[in-house]
Image (cartoon, rainbow, N blue to C red):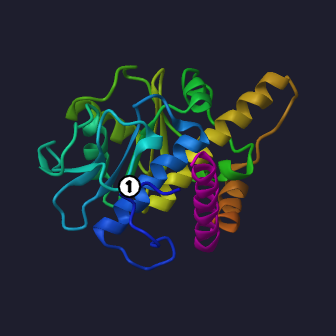
């Protein structure tokens, strides 16, 4: 069952209006909840406003599973609310500063998925020991460890953006993760694959079995083969069908 504020029948269209994209962003929040990113009312995605006004950010005091299309506010890159009603998340600078630093990024996510957060509390590197870990092969997954605090100032936001660099995700030590994408689809898959990769490597480490990770060049090529645009479209639609089944059953 879709939330009442979700635009109907837009998943299979080429409509890229703000209203439609916010509908997709709302579903992305709920998909991430379904895939292990939920932590009460914490966690949020943002979408770069296509008219250059700033970014659309999930309203505060809502769990990921509660977000509908209307549950976003437009803020500028200095945090001023320009449109919409609802509480502005304290960690808006994380989104704003990553978008300032990365013009290729249109969607930013921040959440506290259990396995990736556990992994980020260590200083072990995330290795490509899982198929979808290849998503991160080119730039790796860096770790921000200047503080375990939440990212509530532009200065901290710029530090996180600096550590993220050109990567698709960053571990926030003793805190959570941030992940990015050129689209709602790509950012959602980055968040899911990050949690899957951390869970897999933690299980492998706990097994005590010896292992060798593939080399970087092989993993980069693997990413190109298993994550082309057509596959990303397929995975995005799969998770949307899974969400529909879950919400339909709950109804």
| In-front residue for pair 186/33 | 33
| In-front residue for pair 51/4 | 4
Q: Is residue 108 visible?
A: yes
Q: Is residue 241 magenta?
A: yes
Q: Considering only vertical position in the picture, is 174 above or below 232? A: above
Q: Position of residue 229 (x, y in %)?
A: 58, 71
Identify the residue at image location x=40%, y=19%: 148
Q: Is residue 31 magenta?
A: no
Q: Main structural element of the magenta stretch: helix, strand or loop?
A: helix
Q: Which residues are magenta?
A: 228-251
Report whether 212 appears left or right of 83. right
Q: Secondary structure at mark 1?
A: strand
Q: Position of residue 34 (x, y in %)?
A: 58, 43
Q: Position of residue 169 (x, y in %)?
A: 49, 44
Identify the residue at image location x=43%, y=61%: 24
Residue that lies at the very extreme toward the bottom in this rendered image: 14
Residue wearing tag 1: 107
Image-quadrant location for residue 240:
bottom right
Q: Position of residue 94 (x, y in %)?
A: 31, 38
Report whether 75 appears left or right of 163. left
| In-front residue for pair 23/200 | 23
């Amino acid at each position: 069952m879709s939330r009442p504020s979700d635009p109907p029948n837009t998943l299979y269209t080429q409509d890229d209006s703000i209203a439609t994209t916010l509908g997709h962003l709302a579903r992305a929040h709920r998909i991430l909840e379904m895939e292990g990113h939920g932590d009460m009312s914490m966690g949020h995605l943002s979408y770069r406003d296509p008219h250059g006004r700033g970014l659309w950010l999930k309203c505060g005091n809502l769990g990921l599973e509660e977000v509908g299309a209307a549950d976003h506010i437009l803020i500028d890159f200095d945090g001023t609310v320009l449109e919409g009603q609802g509480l502005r998340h304290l960690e808006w600078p994380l989104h704003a500063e990553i978008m300032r630093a990365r013009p290729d990024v249109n969607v930013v996510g921040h959440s506290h998925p259990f396995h990736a957060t556990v992994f980020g509390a260590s200083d072990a590197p995330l290795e490509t020991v899982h198929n979808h870990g290849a998503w991160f092969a080119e730039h790796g997954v860096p770790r921000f460890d200047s503080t375990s605090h939440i990212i509530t100032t532009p200065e901290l936001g710029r530090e996180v953006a600096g550590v993220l660099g050109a990567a698709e995700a960053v571990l926030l030590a003793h805190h959570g993760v941030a992940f990015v994408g050129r689209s709602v689809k790509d950012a959602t898959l980055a968040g899911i694959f990050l949690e899957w990769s951390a869970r897999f490597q933690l299980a492998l480490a706990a097994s005590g079995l010896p292992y060798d990770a593939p080399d970087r060049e092989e993993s980069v090529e693997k990413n190109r083969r298993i994550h082309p645009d057509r596959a990303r479209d397929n995975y995005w639609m799969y998770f949307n069908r899974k969400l529909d089944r879950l919400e339909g059953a709950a109804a």
